[in-house]
Image (spheres, helix red, strand yellow):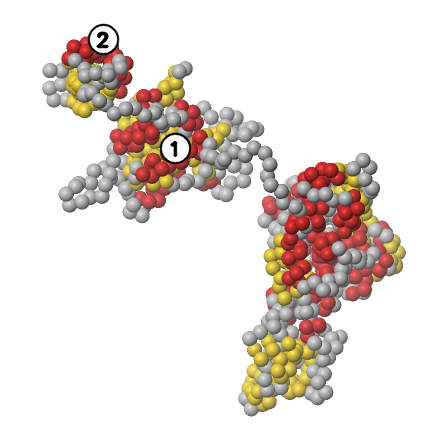
């Protein structure tokens, strides 16, 4: 909201307060001022002049020689190149010695003809010419005929003005008006407020308004008050210059006296108004209703819009003529031929206006105010103020009475405030008199305290105040935040720290980054088809659809991290970056319901992707492609860091989306059984072909089970003081028997002496019997208290071999 200090001074004295000081005080009191703009961009020595005559320059086709009366006692000869200059005009004249932005005017000869000044355009005066009426945007600025000759142009155009740019939070919609800003400044400065009664300036003549117009409201829940006045015999014309100056200072372009007055009153009262051409209304009736299915409306911006049934419209007998609270319709626009107008003022529901505005992508000054809820008690005063101005400056005759429907004035809220609570919250010792004085500055009626409780009557213009804590905030900001005493914090304090999950997440990021992986961040929104690629973690559940997606490609929440990792891999591969080691720690989302009624599940997941080669090719080292076991090694490093090496197992079972022979599910062993926590492996060949990727290996693991099962403290052990004894065995088993099952059996029967077991060779084919394989394992035995004897090792080793033979039908290979 741009607030003119010149306009503001109509309501409150600003004597002795500069614009910068006022901006500081307002900011300190809770409303930030983004800046102070001076309308005078550095001009001086410019007055209004009257062009007496215009003749063509004798030596230049595009120049004119003008004789101008600038109120200086003698006429000036000025050479002007503007196409629109003409005799009989009132224009801004820069005298010799005048200063313009970046320019000082001197006597000069143009093609041999003396020029004693310059006739100025709006842009040369530092005005934003886009805010001028269209006919004044090119050429020199033509002033109204009644402008006094010789007057300082700063006064004529209202350039001795400073604009405060209010950066309002959504709750302070009361300051979206000059009167609202005046109330705020009055409270901050503690100065009296001067407001005139608009009804006192209004003269009604020419019969009853109800004889010319009828109004109705279909549903008062969405329009609580709708009021109109009928004004006959208006004469559309340019507005008085003072109205145009104030509109331009607020960033509004003047159009004509009727439209300008409705905009002026909207800025003054914060109450949007609209004027309809009364002769173009069908049936002499105007009403508020919801749009009908398939109904169309051409709005004032010339666009034809298809209306939805939930949109609130203004309509006559023939159909919709305006979008309630957003924009009027072209069919009833006020034009140069308009004679009779119906002036509208209403209280529309903010939520309904917001939905209509968003759905149509149409924002206006009116919708901005209605969305934040206007003062219900400003509907009639604003209507009367605009009618009085139209009667004065557009020659209209205001018919008697207001034609209205719906609730009239709204009741003011009465809140109770405990003085003890107020002082306890603020750490102050304010007396009843001080509190009443502060509420008086806010123009809140306040009664005497009974048992320390004050009753405060809140005006309807302050819709942001609903509770006693809101009143406490008002007292705090007026009393001055700097005046509130500082006190030391009392009570038990605890040092800040990361939660266990935050700590482990950081540890995993550090671990993987040091291991050569790069962290990436993918979109949480994916295509619906992508949510079906890797269903292992969300099997039997549904993806969450967005109500208002940015696009079809981002229309559901992800149920897996892998689709986004693949998109990132594809992006890099297409740019000749094929050696990838990526990880992401992020959340996946899904729901048990087909139609979402509850908060969806949100689970943290670790995703990994490997592709390309392990290391760059060098003169003495060949580039080796990554494989399944590089990915498994990264996962084992993660599990080992969390102390879960012996509690995680892998089982090859070809999860959906993976290569059927190079993939596995990952399980966490718990007391109640094993739980699947993830998947890993190579992408399915068909998916790789569709994405045009080389061999790519991916994995995703649920992190919540790992957070819960991870060891809480590192456990240290002494260095080994006694030597270990190694035994190697090679067993022939069925080809389907996983090596991991052999190792699990060895650990189970090796007891406390078995320190380590590792597969170091797998052999198939050749002389090996069909359907069989040879698995060679290295076992390390060690005792912590003494050097092992052969007898001790043989006893345990024989038990291990016997278990393999009995469980898996293993045969020792010689």
Q: Is residue 102 left or right of residue 75?
A: left
| Label 2 or label 1, whichever comes before in sequence order | 1
Quarter of the figure with the N terminus: bottom right
Tell me the residue at 52%/37% (across/down).
Answer: 546
Residue 373 visible in image: no
Tell me the residue at 64%/76% (across/down).
Answer: 44
Q: Which of the two residues, 510 or 219, is positioned nearer the viewer here?
A: 510
Residue 1: mark: none
535 up-or-down from 361: above or below? above
Tell me the residue at 80%/44% (across/down).
Answer: 446
| Residue annotated with mark 1 | 606
| Residue annotated with mark 2 | 806
Q: Are marks 2 and 1 in contact (CB under 8 Å)?
A: no
Crowd rating for badge 2 (residues with CA inside 10 Å; few <14, some 14–19, many 20+) = few
Tell me the residue at 72%/43% (across/down).
Answer: 429
Q: Which of the two residues, 689 or 571, is positioned nearer the viewer here?
A: 571
94 up-or-down from 795: above or below? below
Q: Quadrant of residue 614?
A: top left
Residue 213: image location, x then y, percent: 81, 51
Label 1 residue SS: strand
Crowd rating for badge 1 (residues with CA inside 10 Å; few <14, some 14–19, many 20+) = many
Residue 277: image location, x then y, percent: 75, 57
Residue 520 visible in image: yes
Q: Which of the two residues, 384 or 632, is positioned nearer the viewer here?
A: 632
681 up-or-down from 316: above or below? above
Distance Cα–Cα, label 2 vs label 1? 39 Å
Residue 528: image location, x then y, percent: 45, 35
Label 2 residue SS: helix
Q: Quadrant of residue 731?
A: top left
Q: Quadrant of residue 686?
A: top left
Quarter of the figure with the C terminus: top left
């Amino acid at each position: 909201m741009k607030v003119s200090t010149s306009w503001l001074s109509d309501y409150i004295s600003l004597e002795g307060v500069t614009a910068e000081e006022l901006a500081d005080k307002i900011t300190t009191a809770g409303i930030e001022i983004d800046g102070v703009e001076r309308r005078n961009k550095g001009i001086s020595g410019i007055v209004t002049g009257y062009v007496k005559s215009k003749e063509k320059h004798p030596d230049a086709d595009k120049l004119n020689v003008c004789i101008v009366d600038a109120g200086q006692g003698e006429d000036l000869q000025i050479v002007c190149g503007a196409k629109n200059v003409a005799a009989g005009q009132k224009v801004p004249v820069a005298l010799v010695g005048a200063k313009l932005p970046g320019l000082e005017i001197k006597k000069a000869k143009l093609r041999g003809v003396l020029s004693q000044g310059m006739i100025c355009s709006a842009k040369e005066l530092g005005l934003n010419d886009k805010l001028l009426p269209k006919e004044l945007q090119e050429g020199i600025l033509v002033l109204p005929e009644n402008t006094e000759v010789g007057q300082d142009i700063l006064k004529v155009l209202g350039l001795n003005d400073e604009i405060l740019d209010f950066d309002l939070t959504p709750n302070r919609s009361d300051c979206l008006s000059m009167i609202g800003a005046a109330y705020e400044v009055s409270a901050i400065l503690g100065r009296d407020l001067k407001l005139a009664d608009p009804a006192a300036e209004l003269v009604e003549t020419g019969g009853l308004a109800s004889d010319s117009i009828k109004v109705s409201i279909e549903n008062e829940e969405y329009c609580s008050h709708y009021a109109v006045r009928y004004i006959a015999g208006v004469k559309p014309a340019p507005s008085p210059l003072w109205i145009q100056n104030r509109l331009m200072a607020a960033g509004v372009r003047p159009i004509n006296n009727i439209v300008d007055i409705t905009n002026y009153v909207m800025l003054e009262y914060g109450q949007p108004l609209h004027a309809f051409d009364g002769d173009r209304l069908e049936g002499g009736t105007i009403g508020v209703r919801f749009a009908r299915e398939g109904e169309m409306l051409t709005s004032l911006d010339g666009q034809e819009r298809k209306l939805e049934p939930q949109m609130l419209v203004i309509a006559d007998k023939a159909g919709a003529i305006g979008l309630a609270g957003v924009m009027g319709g072209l069919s009833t626009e006020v034009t140069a031929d308009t004679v009779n107008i119906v002036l509208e003022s209403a209280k529309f529901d903010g939520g309904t206006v917001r939905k209509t505005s968003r759905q149509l992508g149409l924002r206006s000054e009116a919708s901005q105010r209605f969305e934040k809820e206007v003062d219900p008690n400003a509907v009639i005063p604003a209507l009367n103020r605009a009618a009085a101005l139209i009667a004065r400056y557009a020659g209209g005759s205001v018919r008697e009475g207001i034609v209205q429907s719906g609730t009239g004035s709204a009741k003011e809220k009465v809140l109770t405030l405990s003085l003890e609570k107020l002082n306890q919250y603020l750490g102050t010792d304010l007396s009843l008199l001080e509190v009443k004085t502060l509420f008086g500055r806010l123009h809140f009626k306040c009664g005497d305290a009974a048992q320390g409780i004050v009753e405060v009557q809140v005006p309807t213009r302050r819709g942001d105040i609903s509770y006693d804590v809101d009143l406490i905030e008002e007292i705090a900001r007026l009393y001055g935040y700097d005046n509130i005493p500082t006190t030391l914090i009392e009570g038990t304090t605890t040092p800040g720290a990361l939660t266990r999950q935050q700590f482990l997440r950081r540890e995993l990021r550090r671990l993987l980054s040091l291991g050569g992986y790069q962290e990436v961040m993918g979109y949480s929104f994916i295509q619906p088809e992508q949510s079906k690629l890797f269903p292992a973690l969300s099997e039997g559940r549904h993806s969450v659809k967005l109500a208002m997606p940015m696009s079809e490609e981002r229309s559901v929440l992800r149920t897996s991290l892998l689709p986004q990792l693949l998109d990132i891999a594809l992006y890099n591969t297409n740019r000749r970056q094929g050696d990838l080691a990526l990880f992401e720690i992020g959340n996946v989302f899904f729901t048990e319901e087909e139609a979402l009624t509850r908060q969806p599940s949100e689970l943290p997941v670790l995703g990994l992707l490997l592709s390309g080669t392990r290391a760059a090719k060098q003169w003495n080292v060949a580039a080796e492609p990554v494989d399944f076991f590089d990915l498994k090694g990264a996962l084992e490093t993660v599990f080992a860091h969390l102390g879960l090496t012996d509690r995680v197992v892998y089982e090859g079972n070809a999860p959906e989306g993976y290569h059927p022979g190079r993939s596995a599910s990952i399980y966490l062993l718990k007391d109640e059984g094993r739980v699947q926590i993830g998947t890993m492996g190579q992408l399915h060949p068909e998916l790789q072909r569709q994405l045009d990727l080389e061999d790519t290996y991916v994995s995703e693991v649920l992190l919540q089970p790992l957070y819960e099962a991870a060891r809480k403290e590192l456990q240290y052990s002494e260095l080994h003081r006694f030597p270990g004894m190694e035994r190697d065995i090679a067993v022939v088993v069925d080809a389907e028997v996983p090596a991991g099952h052999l190792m699990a059996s060895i650990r189970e029967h090796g007891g406390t002496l078995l320190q380590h077991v590792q597969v170091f060779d797998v052999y198939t084919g050749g002389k090996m019997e069909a359907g069989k394989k040879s698995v060679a394992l290295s076992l390390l035995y060690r005792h912590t208290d003494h050097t092992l004897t052969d007898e001790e090792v043989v006893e345990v080793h024989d038990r291990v071999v016997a278990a393999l033979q009995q469980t898996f039908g293993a045969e020792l290979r010689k």
